[in-house]
Amino acid sequence: MRLATLALAVSTTSALAQADRVGADDPAALLQLMRDAGVKSSLGIDGWGDPTIEARSGDVAWEVLFHGCTDGAGCTNVMFAAGFASPGATPDRVNEWNAAQLYSRAFVDDTGEAVLELPINTTGGISTAAFSDGLDWWLTLLPEFRDHVQ
């Protein structure tokens, strides 16, 4: 009897743990978490046929890019990304940002825009709390980076 109870507890715990996990392989679940956090967002498809989420936080437009996809499905990672066209978006200014940051990366692209990116590895699934924490971090970085390069 004890063994059956233990097996049921392990099975139930495993099912609950799986229900609390999300990944790039389920764009709709990530979209819902973003909406639950108050982010205006919509799901789309990029030029390569992979999912993308277009988002807006305040006056800043940004997107979630999906990577490691095969034929638009089974994606393994996401990257939050935003571009800022600003006269202060110089390589030196962006390098100052990178030197002071641990998790994000920034660069000036070939159009002169300062781009901020934050990758999230979701291979095998991550907890909804971990994704939400990454999203919170991103939402903090966005206005700080915009102000830095203006």
Image: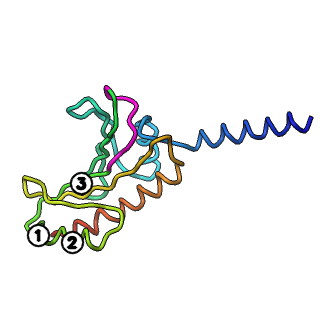
The residue at 12%/57% (across/down) is 113
Dots 2, 1 in contact, CB < 8 A: yes
- Between residues 74 and 61, which one lies in front from this camera angle? 74
Residue neighbourhood size for the residue with mark 3, other residues' Cα within 10 Å, grouped as few (<14), some (14–19), many (≥20)? many
**Considering only vertical position in the picture, is 6 above or below 99?**
above
Measure the alpha-carbon separation of dots 3 and 2: 14 Å
Residue type at mark 2: give it.
His
Q: Secondary structure at mark 3?
A: strand
The residue labelled by disc 3 is 82
Q: Nearer the N terminus, badge 2 or badge 1?
A: 1
Question: Where does residue 75 sit, x and y in percent of width and height?
Answer: 38, 35
- Alpha carbon of mark 3 to alpha carbon of mark 1: how far? 16 Å
Mark identifier at residue 77:
none
Residue 84's x, y, as percent?
A: 17, 59
Q: Quadrant of residue 100?
A: bottom left
Q: Which residue is mark 2?
A: 148
**Looking at the picture, how far across and down is residue 42, in whole percent?**
33, 40
* Span highlighted in magenta in the image: 71-79
Is disc 1 surrounded by few (<14), some (14 to 19) or many (20+) residues within 10 Å? some
Split into 4 quadrants, where in the image is the N terminus?
A: top right
